[in-house]
Amino acid sequence: MVMKQLFILICLVSMTSTFAQQTLTPELLWKLNRVAGGTVSSDGNYVLYTQRSFDITENKGNTEIFVYNVKDGQSTQITTTSLSENEVQWGTGNSIWFISNENEGAQIWSMSVDGSNKTQRSHFKDVELEGFKLAADGTFLVAIEAVKVVKTVNEKYPDLAKANVRIEDDLMYRHWDHFDDGKKRQLFIHKIEGGAIQNESKNLLEGEVFDGCIPPFGGGDHFDICPEGKTIIYASKKKSGKDFATSTNSDLYAYTIASGTTKNLTVGNLGYDNNPQFSSNGLVAWTAMEHDGFEADKNDLMIRDENGKNINLTKNFDITVSSFRWHPDNQSIYFISPTAGTEQIFVIDIKSQKIKQITSEKVDYVSLSLSSKYLYAGKQSMIAPTDLVSIDLKNNVEKQITFANKEQLKGIVMPKVEETWVTTTDGKQMLVWMIYPPNMKKEQKYPSLLYCQGGPQSMVSQFFSYRWNLALMASQGYIVIAPNRRGLPGFGQEWNDAISKDWGGQAMKDYLTATDEAAKNPNVDKDRIGAVGASYGGYSVFMLAGIHENRFKTFISHCGLFNLESWYGTTEELFFANWDHGGPYWEEKNKENYAKNSPHKYVANWNTPIMVIQGGMDFRVPEAEGMQAFQAAQLKGLKSRYLYLPEESHWVTSPQNSLVWQREFFTWLGETLK
């Protein structure tokens, strides 16, 4: 009887253990809450953030507002609507302001820190509101509004109301994922009187046909209001057509409210000037790139001193700045920078210009906010979605303050991430992240995936993606090989810049080196290795398909560049192509580069199954690239598949489309890495 009871107990324990040992799935990935923000109130007592969740059945997401109380250590959800709140920010007296579509379309609302006293502050008519920022004293705000500057065909020919036609005379008629709508996103000052936002406004770019922030991703971080409320500084790329398409030169403009005059503060700098941010004593800092046309240039941290002189704080450091925040004492600036496959937090003393790294864990810090005593940051890793942490500025002690997915991840066993370094063909040391399946058995061999990163200048950091999720791949039984090959930031500017004009050269050798080294791992089945990637990673897959010498058994390429000549003729931001490939393919000096680095030139060597994925609204890498690659594979008689997402762009953002993407991704691997 005792033995029988013991046997039952062992079975129950075993069953409990089996049920508890669940792994990450595509469906679970879309059930995770996505934390963003983390802005501390001026008194340091509260941290404001948002949490986005998705309804797969309804195929949509919803963003709600949360507040963390620093004193009692508790988070409270203060909105519960079916409509997303966005542009969430602090107002005076710890009020919270945001945009909601709850009434009269996109309008600005406010509420108390506990969610009470919810009040609609604007009643805009015929205003396409896309963002805003409050002045420090709450007497006015600056709104981002869409302004029509070009007539549509139907307005030009009013008798042809059903015509669906575009007439173009210049470039930039489409950008990343949308066609030009004839509107510019400009900045408007609205007074706030008696708690109500006035409809009457003043356009900072009156009479101009440019955006008041840098498209297509610019928003509230592209302008700031000085503490005294006298000046607004905004980043703008005041170019159009071919000039816009071939240049990255943006500038900072200071608009004086009283006089209505505008001054360019960065005339001498030819690259990107962006992200202006005032200190509490009125100094402005921003990020700047030096070279025109190089979108992945070193990002330096600049300030403008009391005498109006622009000073480069990071000029003498081989470091690039991702984002930054002033400390309230105005003596230092904290910033995030990529380093050695992670995103870490640094601080620079303004006076001495000395830099100190204050975090070192193998993670990515993705946002910053500061009180006098604490730093609040978003933190993620390959095996953990973003949560907020606080860091005590006295002793650097870190504490996690949100647990957005505690219930969702309960009982989920995550993969193991290992840092390895390999020697490249030219004698350099390269970081390769190895991600192993949960509960991996030491004696077992596993199919493996070489992950090819996009960018091309985009570090393989400790990112937690909702599509290219390396932990998800490992959780399906694959060992993931993720090299920080040539051309990525975080390993010095020389390593970052080495990719330009050599897309198919040393970077491909780095990939093959990482694959060969991984094949020596006793758990890697060298006869079942695939290569996957998107954007430049998709290009890499196409390129490897022609030069891999039977290392790989399958390929998956998403939005990859296949024919560099046809791509040059259809992509929109030509500065990218000009910098990385030297210019147009028809110029004699560039012909060898295009011939050497274009994957379509190596199709004769293709002999491996390949899946091609493409978004129909991807204008950075237009759909013809994927179509050409699939057609070539079909005509070569290779097992091939084409997954086309007509309404998606360079990314996949719809929940159900993303799930189809994931399911087809793993179905293909199951078919070809048996």
Image (cartoon, helix red, strand yellow):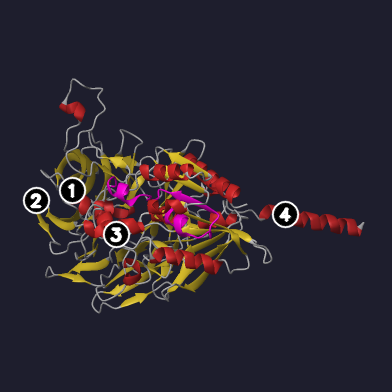
Q: Are marks 2 and 4 in contact (CB under 8 Å)?
A: no
Across and down, in percent, residue 428 comes to: 42, 75
Secondary structure of residue under mark 1: helix
In the figure, residue 250 lies in which quadrant?
bottom left
Residue that numbered label 3 is attached to: 592
Q: Earlier in the sequence, mark 4 or mark 1?
A: 4
In this view, the residue in front, 84 or 423, is 423
Q: Are marks 2 and 1 in contact (CB under 8 Å)?
A: no
The answer for how far apart the CA atoms under marks 2 and 1 are is 30 Å
The answer for how far apart the CA atoms under marks 3 and 4 are is 62 Å
Magenta-highlighted residues = 542-571
Closer to the eye: label 1 or 3: 3
In the figure, residue 61 lies in which quadrant?
top left
The answer for how far apart the CA atoms under marks 1 and 3 are is 25 Å
Q: Give the quarter of the figure containing the N terminus.
A: bottom right
In this view, the residue in front, 534 or 203, is 534
Q: Residues within 10 Å of mark 2 (few under 14, many from 20)?
A: few
Q: Residues within 10 Å of mark 4 (few under 14, many from 20)?
A: few
Residue that numbered label 4 is attached to: 16
Q: Residue at x 43, y 51 (%)?
A: 603
Type of the residue with mark 4? Thr
Locate residue 437 relative to residue 317 in the image: left or right: right
Type of the residue with mark 1? Lys
Q: Earlier in the sequence, mark 2 or mark 1?
A: 1
Residue that numbered label 2 is attached to: 260
Q: Residue at x 30, y 64 (%)?
A: 325
